[in-house]
């Protein structure tokens, strides 16, 4: 049985004996994910971490540990390490670089993000997906995949299973984009720069953006990363808006800040620090590695909360939402790129 968020909050603090088995597994997750990435370079580390977490939750002999003694530590890792990784994600964002794209591109990305979020949220609710899944999937598609889902899930106090299911769906669709989008570049008449912008505006996770755009060369990769960073910059406003909306509806707890969660404030502070240009390159490089390790451990923990039989019961609706949202974000961003370049 999946542990609910309310249950997670009752576990002892970090470092207590009951957390150790799960934290040890969460620490092993990034190492295993990195090994998979080395063997299969086309598979991003974060994608591998989610898949390995799902596998651990269903492998005979391991699943009993994952769902039993390791559950408290894995749940703790999926929440607290996710927060820390999102804070460090801000160091990869330079506001000056994003603005250098030009206001037309900024306006295009804002429109695509808003339309993708609203359209996916509406479709998910129409399909009758349970809990916060429509909200979480909409956030992942619109902003930055699993990281956005984790951030919005924190602000909304979402059930762990809803978060894990949404991460699995967005990760799957984003991984498929790595194989599908490069095949569409020439049929759609996109040069390297336009393909890069389309990739940055439509693919979910940062690692998936890099893996997709690099197939068209350095020019495409540079444009893709800048556009993607602009989407990442919208993470904090989105989380703040979700927190305000839920607070007005009475969904709030004493543990959660009234408007802006602390980890989102940390994200903004790190982004501002990066923009000053005062952070040495070596520090940024170390921060990128630490960020990836933290997010990989958190996503391994989230993946371990996925219960495939439960997912299969809503599989058709989940797949319909994933496909529909994919068409929306890819189509809108393609049209936006053509209009602005």
Image (cartoon, rainbow, N blue to C red):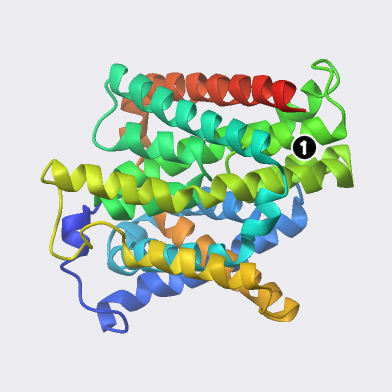
Q: Nearer the viewer, residue 281 or 285?
A: 281
Residue 265 spot, x, y in % from top left: 39, 65
| Residue 191 location, quadrant | top right
Identify whether 240 is placed above or below 340.
below
Residue 216 spot, x, y in % from top left: 86, 37
Residue on which the image places disc 1: 196
Residue 97 spot, x, y in % from top left: 70, 55
Q: Is residue 159 visible?
A: no
Q: Badge 1: how crowded within 10 Å, few (<14), some, or many (20+)?
A: many
| Residue 12 location, quadrant | bottom left
Identify whether 1 is placed above or below 94.
above
The residue under the point 76% across, 55% down is 39
Identify whether 335 is placed above or below 56.
above
Q: Relative to residue 283, is residue 237 drawn left or right?
A: left
The residue under the point 53% across, 45% down is 144
Q: Is residue 330 visible?
A: yes
Extreme residue toward the front, this view: 103
Q: Secondary structure at mark 1?
A: helix
């Amino acid at each position: 049985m999946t542990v609910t968020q309310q249950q997670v909050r009752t576990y002892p603090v970090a470092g207590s004996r009951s957390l150790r088995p799960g934290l040890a597994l969460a620490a092993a997750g990034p190492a295993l994910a990195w090994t998979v990435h080395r063997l299969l370079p086309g598979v991003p580390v974060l994608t591998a971490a989610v898949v390995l977490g799902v596998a651990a939750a269903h492998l005979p002999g391991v699943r009993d540990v994952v769902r039993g003694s390791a559950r408290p530590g894995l749940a703790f890792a999926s929440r607290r390490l996710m927060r820390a990784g999102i804070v460090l994600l801000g160091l990869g964002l330079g506001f000056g670089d994003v603005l250098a794209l030009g206001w037309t591109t900024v306006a295009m990305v804002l429109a695509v993000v808003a339309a993708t979020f609203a359209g996916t949220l509406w479709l998910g609710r129409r399909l009758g997906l349970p809990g916060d899944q429509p909200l979480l999937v909409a956030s992942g598609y619109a902003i930055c995949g699993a990281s956005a889902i984790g951030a919005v899930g924190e602000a909304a106090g979402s059930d762990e299973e809803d978060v894990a299911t949404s991460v699995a769906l967005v990760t799957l669709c984003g991984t498929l984009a790595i194989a599908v989008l490069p095949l569409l570049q020439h049929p759609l008449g996109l040069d390297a720069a336009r393909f890069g912008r389309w990739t940055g505006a439509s693919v979910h996770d940062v690692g998936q953006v890099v893996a997709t755009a690099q197939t068209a060369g350095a020019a495409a990769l540079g444009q893709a990363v800048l556009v993607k960073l602009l989407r990442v910059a919208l993470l904090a406003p989105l989380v703040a808006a979700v927190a305000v909306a839920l607070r007005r509806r009475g969904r709030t707890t004493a543990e959660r800040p009234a408007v802006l969660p602390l980890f989102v404030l940390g994200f903004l502070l790190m982004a501002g620090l990066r923009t000053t240009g005062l952070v040495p390159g070596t520090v940024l490089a170390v921060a990128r590695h630490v960020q990836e390790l933290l997010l990989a451990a958190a996503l391994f923990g989230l993946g371990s909360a996925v219960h495939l039989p439960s997912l299969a019961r809503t599989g058709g609706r989940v797949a319909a939402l994933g496909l529909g949202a994919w068409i929306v974000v890819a189509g809108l961003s393609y049209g936006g790129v053509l209009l602005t370049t």
